Amino acid sequence: MATVSIEPQNLKSGMSYKVRVRAGKKDPLKRSMSRTFKTKLKAERFAKSIKAQIEAHDYGFLLTDLAVGDALGQFQSYVFADKAMASQYNKNAPSIIKRFIDSSLADLPIDLIGSHDIIKSMQEIQKQYQLSPSTMDGYLSALSTAFIDANAILGFNFNIDAIRDARPTLKRIGFISKSPARHRVLSLDELKLITKYYENMDMRGRSSIPMIDLMWFALYICMRQGEICQKLKWKHYDETTHILTVDKRKHPNDSKNKITKIMLNAATIEIINKMPKGKPTDPIFPFNPKSVSSSWTIAMKKLGIDNLHFHDLRATGSSELYKHGMDLYGVSKLAGHSSAKMQLTHYLRNIPVVLPDDHIKLN
């Protein structure tokens, strides 16, 4: 914790008292400051006020001329040193913030930055890393979150209005945008090609991952690849009731534990029964998600199948279940969405609008 001391100063002009504040090793701000008073009483009052601020984790007194790079760096050190706190942020946040620290924004005072400065730094990052407008939109959001949280947690005074003012212009000139909606689904012909490819791989002993089983499980269960691989444990599966419990599901606005209970069908039960049974804490599908992605990418390239991601199986499964009679609420809950809006906007793809058989009758 920061230390506060009062040092008597015997100057030519007379006696004075210097209050010196030094940040401790574990303090979020690695800075120091001092202030001189003509009377000991005033120095003691100031020192008492500073101690109270430190105890309240308010480090505003250390913020004189604090630059963006320094402030973001200290925010990073404070937040991402705590695993529980760090888990509340996007996993790419540290690398994104580091790129802003390396931009022209870094040397500007945190309270004096303007919309022009934000746009300039965004342009620098985009030029250096050749990022898409949707990715740049994510960068701006990550910077906004860092500014807001640094102000709230550490008492900084970032000019948050700079980002708010820059966003409409960046959007208008096409520099940032939301990700375009995907419409890709797995076709029956593609399913046959992929199945044949992995069957040949298995026959030649060149596949250590049961990709066909993973593909079908993803289609039936509509789960994210990261949820299927490694996350599902044997303790989550009740072999007597065939109920699979999926907990800690991803949610963009809610840190609470979101749980879905799924009663499996014969096909998914058969897939799980093929997996090597482990301890309750062992994963049902003990495969590295990155290895699964790599295998899928290689297969698509060799088969000449364009723009089909493993994640598209989730949308394909949702669409097929909906077409075969599962209601929108059930599909949404299975996929781990809190509302049907996400399903309607992103996951129900290639669903035709069905006209009624009867003729329209005008009264």
Image: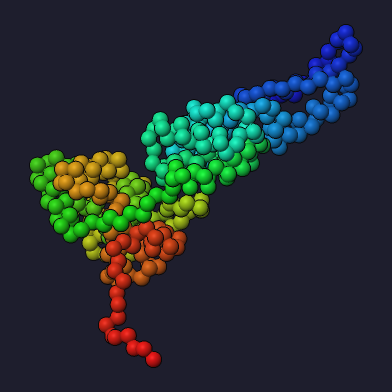
**Does residue 261 appear in the picture of this structure?**
no
Q: Which residue is pictured at 23% across the width and 53% down the height? A: 215
Placement of the N terminus among the 4 image quadrants? top right
Q: Is residue 314 above or below residue 77?
A: below
In the image, 210 versus 60, the foreground residue is: 60
Where is residue 172? Give x, y as percent: 48, 47
Q: Position of residue 41 (x, y in %)?
A: 89, 25
Colouring method of the image: rainbow
Quadrant in which the C terminus appears = bottom left
Could you say which is closer to the camera, residue 57 or residue 246? Answer: 57
| 72 displayed left or right of 331 | right
Q: Is residue 311 visible?
A: yes
- Residue drawn at x 30%, y 40% is 290
210 vs 121, left or right, is: left
Where, by quadrant of the figure, is residue 163 drawn? top right
- The residue positioned 56% from the left and 36% from the top of the image is 116
200 sits to left or right of 296? left
In the image, 326 versus 359, the foreground residue is 359
Residue closer to the observer: 129 or 28: 129
- Which residue is rendered at x = 72% and y = 30% of the image? 61
Q: Residue furthest top?
A: 12
Q: Position of residue 351 (x, y in %)?
A: 30, 66
Examine the rendered structure and indicate whether residue 326 appears above or below residue 41: below
Left/right placement of residue 71 relative to residue 53 reads left
Residue 324 lies, in percent from the top left, at 27, 70
- In the orientation shown, which residue stands out farthest toward the bottom? 363
User: How many marks do you count on the picture?
Assistant: 0
Task: Tell me where residue 162 sits by quadrant.
Answer: top right
